[in-house]
Amino acid sequence: MAINSCSALFAKVCLFSLWSFSFCVQAQISFDGATRFVLNSDQKLITMIAVNEGADTALVQVMLERGEPDDAEDLPLAISKPLLLIPPYGKASIDIIYQGQGLPNDRESYFLIKALVVPKKAKNKSEVSLAVQHNLKLFYRPVFASSIESAYEEISWTKSGDVEAGVVENKSPYYLTMTNIQFFNRGGQECGNVLSHMMLKPFQAVSVSALGCGKDITHVNYRVVGDSGITYARTAKFPLVTGVEKS
């Protein structure tokens, strides 16, 4: 009983402590609505625009790293301004520069741009300033014979044998992003859990769980994400293997 009483008291103290502090995010940064960027192989650099939409000066730290966690190779890319001071309602440009070698030419390369908005010091002891980090995608894209639009059209789906799953395959050299993946059974009903997001590597095949659908999967609905960030609806029927745009 004494232990339970102490636990309850501790919880009340923690709750009171939270009430006693106000949380403050002071700067509002955007990148002109963009969440992904493409650096084509015929470009030496790509320029990002950071926009301060707040009434306070914003201090922003920009970092670049490989998108694949198991890729430990050195970065052949550089950031022109890793630290920015953006005035209220102002803008600042950031160049990402490729040194011209070090990346494969037979497939895209994926990087993660991290933009950390450093908070100002809290005005009083009861305020806690929170840092905000924006994670943006960068793709280095060599010249390919086919377009990314055709790559999305050629995504293939097959059933995974006796397992409650569908296998999706990316046969292209592009990174392909899919959202809201939903399987349907013979009765036209949704089955399994919705997969909110998945990015396929170039030439990668992935098994997607359809647990709860049994062996009765008839089709799958999903959305694909274009270079601009806009998504487009697609559907694929089994055993039909190509995704086509829904009317």
Image: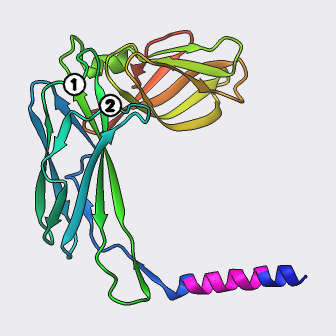
Q: Quadrant of residue 190?
A: top right
Q: Amino acid at mark 1?
A: Gly
Sequence-wise, the earlier of marks 1 and 2 is 2
Residue 137: x %, y % from top left: 30, 40
In the image, residue 15 lies in the stretch drawn in magenta: yes
Vertical placement of residue 114 versus 132, above or below: above
Q: Which residue is mark 2?
A: 73
Whether the residues at callouts 1 and 2 have beta carbons within 8 Å, the answer is yes
Q: Nearer the viewer, residue 16 or 182?
A: 16
Outermost residue toward the right?
Answer: 1
Which residue lies at the image location 63% right of the left edge and 81% below the top edge?
A: 14
Q: Which residue is mark 1?
A: 102
Q: Nearer the viewer, residue 216 or 163?
A: 163
Location of the N terminus (image quadrant)? bottom right
In the image, residue 11 lies in the stretch drawn in magenta: yes
Disc 2 residue crowd, few under 14, some 14–19, many 20+, Cα 10 Å: few
Residue 242: x %, y % from top left: 44, 13
Residue 135: x %, y % from top left: 34, 49
Q: Amino acid at mark 2?
A: Glu
* Residue stretch rendered in magenta on the structure: 7-17
Location of the C terminus (image quadrant)? top left
Q: Quadrant of residue 10?
A: bottom right
